[in-house]
Amino acid sequence: MSSRPRLALKWSDVNRRDAIVAVVLLALMIAAISSKAPAAGQRDGDALAYGLAIPLTLPFAVHRRWPMASLILILAAFAAFAIANYAVYPGVSLFVVLYGIAAHTDRRRSAIALVATVVAMVAALATQPDHVVTSSDWTSSLLAVAVAWLAGENQRSRRARWAALEDRAAMLENERDERDRRAVADERLRIARDLHDIVSHAMSVIAVQAGSGNALLDRDPEGARRSLLNVETASRGALVEMRRMLGVLRDDDDAPGIRAPAPSMTKLGDLVARVRDAGLGVELHVDTDIPPLPTSVDLAAYRIVQESLTNVMKHGGPVAVVKISSSATELCVDISDDGRQRNGHVEPGVRESTRHGIIGMRERVAIYGGQFEAGPRPGGGFRVVARLPLDGVGGVDRQRTSAGGAG
C-alpha cells in the first residue's frame, strides 16, 4: 500500500521537470521570434509564428507518455514554421525532443524518431532561400541531430546498465543472505545434536542412579539418598540444556544414532596431534589453573578450536597458536596464525570461504551469551577469540559431572 504514493510522487517529479523544460523552450522561442530580424526572403514574426511556437515546444512535457504523438506534433509545427520561412531557427526544440525520445523509449521508437527528424530537417533546410542556408548550416544542423540522438541513446544505455547492475547486486545479496541463513540453520542443527548428546548422557545418569537407589532403598538408605541426590542434580542440568535448545530447529526425521561421547577440552591434545600429523604446526598453550568446565562450554570451546584449526589448514599457516585461559567468570579461546606466504608476500587475512565457519562459531558462542571476535591481523594472518561465560552454568554442569562419577 505504501509503495503506490511513492511511485506517484516519483512520476510527478519527472513530469514537472519535463514541463519546466517545455516552458523554457517556449520562452526561448518567443524571445527569438520577437527579436530576430528577417533576412531577404524571410518573414517577420507574426501571430502564426507565435501560435506555432506552442506545438513546437510544449509537447515535450508529455513525450515520456506519448512519445510518437509528441514527435508528430512537433514535426508538423516544425514543417509549417520552415515552409513559412520565418527568420527564427526552430531546430532547438526538435533536438531536445529527439534526445528525450531516444533516452526514455525503446530502440525501435528511437530509430523511427531519428529517421523522421533527419527527413524533416533536410526538407526544412531545402525550402529555405539559397542565400539564407549555407553548407555550414547543413552540416551543423545534421550534426546536431546526430549528437542529440547519440546522447539520448547513451543515456538510455547507461540507465539500462545501471538497472542491470542493481538487479544483479540485489540478486547476489539475496543469495548471500540465503547462504548465511542456511549456514546458521546448519550450525544450529549441529549444536542441537551436540546438546542432544549431553542431555542423553544426563538421562543415562538418571536411569542408572534411579536403579541404584531403588536397589539400595531397603538395605542402604544413605546410599539410596546419595543416588537420589545425583538424580536431582543430573535432571536439573538436563533442564538447563533443554532451555538452551529452545529456538534451535531440527528435522523430526533426523533421529540421531549411536554416537561416541561428545569431545571435550581434555581431548584437545589428541586434536592438536591429528592436525600436526596433517602438516600444520600448532603451538598449544593452556593455563594450568583452568577450573572444571561446564560440559556445554567444554564442548563449545573444543568445537571452536577444531573449526579454527581447520580454517588455518585450508587458508593460513604455517603455524597456528592456540591459547586457552580462564578467569573466575569466563573461558577465553584464542586461535591465531601469521598468514600464508606466497611470492614473498603475506596473503590477506580475510577469507571468504571461512564465512560459514565463522557464522557457526559466532552462533555457538551466542547461545551461551559469550563474546566472539574474528578478523584479519594487522601484519597478516587471521585471529579468532571466543569468550565463554562460566558463571551461571558451571555449578549445575559440575554437579552433573559428579553425578556421573558416582554412577
Image (spheres, rainbow, N blue to C red):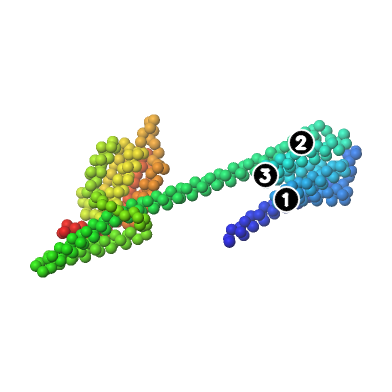
Circle 3 packing at 10 Å, graded few (<14), some (14-19), many (20+), is few
Local SS, label 2? helix
Local SS, label 1? loop
Q: Is residue 205 something that shows in the picture?
A: yes
Query: What's the residue at 58%, 46% (across, down)?
Result: 163
- The quadrant in which the N terminus is found is bottom right
Residue that badge 2 annotates: 142
Give residue 66's mark.
Answer: 1
Of the numbered discs 1 and 2, the one sitting upstream in the chain is 1
Name the amino acid type tagged 2: Leu
Please indicate whether residue 122 sits to the left or right of residue 360 in the image. right
Residue that badge 3 annotates: 106
Whether 71 is drawn above or below 394: the answer is above
On the image, the x and y values in percent for residue 281 come to 28, 37
Please indicate whether residue 11 sits to the left or right of residue 327 in the image. right
On the image, the x and y values in percent for residue 400 come to 22, 59
Name the amino acid type tagged 3: Asp
- The quadrant in which the C terminus is found is bottom left
| Separation of residues labelled 3 and 1 (CA atoms) | 13 Å
Name the amino acid type tagged 1: Trp
Q: Quadrant of residue 275?
A: top left
Query: What's the residue at 70%, 50% (across, down)?
Result: 64
Q: Are marks 3 and 2 in contact (CB under 8 Å)?
A: no
Instruction: Report the residue that reaches farthest toward the left.
Output: 219
| Separation of residues labelled 3 and 2 (CA atoms) | 22 Å
- Foreground residue, 81 or 109? 109
Query: What's the residue at 27%, 46% (across, down)?
Result: 323
